[in-house]
Image (cartoon, helix red, strand yellow):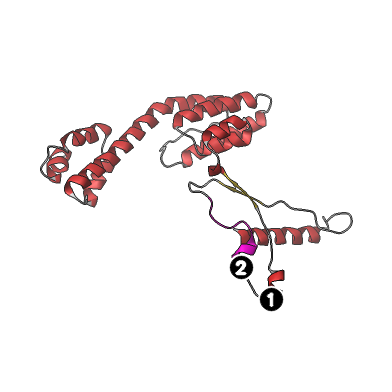
Amino acid sequence: MALRMMVYRGLLYQDLVKRGEVLADGRLPPVLPIVLYNGSQRWSAVTDVFDLIPPVPGLVEQFKPRLKYLLIDENAWTDSELASLKNLVAAVFRIEHPASPAAIGGLLSLLDEWLTERPDLRRMFALWIRATLMRKAEYRIVLPQIDDLQELNVMLAERLEEWAHAYKAEGEALALQKLLKKRFGAVPSDVLAKISAASLEQIDAWLDQVLDAESLDDIIGTTAG
């Protein structure tokens, strides 16, 4: 990323010179390079291209390029820290990494209140939040085309029960897999597939049999049908 940012800045300056959009005295304008990172892990790459090049003895060391970018790592703040900031950027970070699906409703209410006088931003946020939620595989949600924050909030409230059920099913499926592995060793892929496709009620039934069953087939084979 440090190398990429150096290339981007060079291309930007070249374009500004080509279009004659430099400063009045002919010099180049200052540029603040920013990387906004919203991945699930903390950022670990260097932020200065200088650190990508090993030390060089003698005169050459003085001519190693330097270009540092400003890193904004969304994972650097906890949800409570972001909540205390009370601004739109913090709200965006919290929506991208919600503590729970239910927390999104509260964030939408805040945005609805903050953007009362900005219908353009209300629409933009509604469209972006809808796309963000549908992109998250763990939610497994499909939403109709919505461009209003209030309408989106109502629609999400109707989905909370579905989400809660899905989360519970996923958690119990993982617990079942761990228990089966502990009792019977490695769990075959076909059994994992059955667990993944099973309903919450079916998983509960299998969990009830884990302690008493003598074999894996006694649980999955007979109950799964």
Horizontal side, residue 151 vs residue 193: left or right: right
Q: Quadrant of the C terminus?
A: top left
12, 30: nearer the viewer: 30
| Residues in magenta, as a range | 43-53
Q: Secondary structure at mark 2?
A: loop
Q: Which mark is residue 58?
A: 1
Q: Is residue 95 magenta?
A: no
Give, as a three-letter code, the residue at label 1: Gly
Q: Find residue 180 and report its horizontal and vertical position in percent.
A: 20, 44
- Which amino acid type is marked by label 2? Ile
Of marks 1 and 2, which one's residue comes earlier in the chain? Answer: 2
Locate the N terminus and report the quarter of the image it occupies. Answer: bottom right
Residue most extreme to the front:
58
Q: Secondary structure of the magenta portion, mostly?
A: loop
Q: Report helix, strand or loop for mark 1.
A: helix
| Residue found 52% across the figure and 26% down from its top | 106
133 lies left or right of 92 = left
Residue 130, numbered circle: none
The answer to which image quadrant residue 87 occupies is: top right
According to the image, label 2 marks what residue? Answer: 53
Figure check: 62 above or below 191? below
Q: Position of residue 15 (x, y in %)?
A: 75, 59
Q: Which residue occupies 54% across, 29% down?
A: 107
Q: CA distance from mark 1 to mark 2?
A: 15 Å
Q: Residues within 10 Å of mark 2 (few under 14, many from 20)?
A: few
| Residue situated furthest bottom in the rendering | 58
Q: In the image shown, does 68 or 110 lie closer to the viewer?
A: 68
Marks 1,2: beta carbons within 8 A: no
Q: Which quadrant holds residue 216?
A: top left
Q: Position of residue 113 (x, y in %)?
A: 62, 23
Instruction: Using residue 166 as the reference point, say whether residue 29 is left or right of it.
Output: right
